[in-house]
Amino acid sequence: MARKLDRRYSLPVREELEALTHFYLHLHNDLERTKPGSSIRRKTEDRLLDVREQFDRLLDEWVDDDELRERWREHLHTHGPAPAEPKGIPQLVFRGENDAGSVVEVRPDGNELRVFVDGSLLERVDPRRDLASRVPGLVFHLDGFQFRETFAAPPEALQALTAFLEDGEPPWEHVSELLGDGLIDAHLGLTPRGRRALAA
């Protein structure tokens, strides 16, 4: 019997918390290198405050446990180990559709890749399958079917990601969509899938 993809973990809440923490630390380090009272320092302080407010909003919206929220806040400020909850989602490395309308999703699981077709686990495959390509138009072959790569992130999310990569602000408004579509990692780094999306 095919096992269904667990949709409880389809939102990248942990990944978004980690991305905010990573950027907060980056800004904090920048702040330490600025001159007290300078305009650059004030701007960096404002950005730190914005990231902290976004972090708190995300916690309040998606983490029910007060103690767990407090542990995440401690992690933000002390840079110690992150709490174990909420669990992360396995990063999407490929999503595609075939001519019949079936959707395949490929996600890592330890030393292998799990392949889901229409939400059901179909098989596990060798992780050496070439899904690290940066060339758009990737096709995944499975049981005689061809699945052409598709992306769910809206055009405005891709535009915000492009602006960020050109030395702009992180695309916080779209980070959940970008993480969920496997285009960036928790450190806001562009994934091979993200490179394919931007090159398409």
Image (cartoon, rainbow, N blue to C red):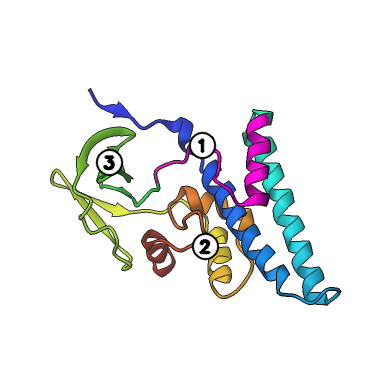
Query: Distance between the Cα atoms at labels 2 and 3?
Result: 26 Å
Find numbered disc 2 in the image and state the secondary structure of the residue it sits on.
Answer: helix
Front-most of residues 135 and 30? 30
2 and 3 marks in contact (CB < 8 Å): no
What's under tag 3, amino acid-wise?
Arg
Q: Is residue 74 magenta?
A: yes
In the rendered view, tell whether residue 72 sits above or below residue 1. Answer: below
Front-most of residues 69 and 178? 69
Which of discs 1 and 2 lies nearer the camera? The answer is: 1
Query: Distance between the Cα atoms at labels 1 and 2?
Result: 30 Å
Asked if residue 41 lies left or right of residue 193, the reply is: right
Task: Examine the image and state in which quarter residue 33 appears.
Answer: bottom right
Q: Of marks 1 and 2, which one's residue comes earlier in the chain?
A: 1
Name the residue tied to disc 3.
Answer: 114
Give the quadrant of the N terminus.
top left
Q: Residue at x 78, y 69 (%)?
A: 43
**How far across and how far down the image is residue 138, in percent?**
28, 60
**How far across and how far down the image is residue 62, in percent?**
62, 35
Name the residue tied to disc 1.
Answer: 84
Q: Residue at x 58, y 68 (%)?
A: 164
Front-most of residues 9 and 83? 83
Asked if residue 70 lies left or right of residue 135, the reply is: right
Name the residue tied to disc 2.
Answer: 158
Q: Is residue 132 magenta?
A: no
Asked if residue 166 lies left or right of residue 192, the reply is: right
Part of the protein shown in magenta:
67-90
What's under tag 2, amino acid-wise?
Leu
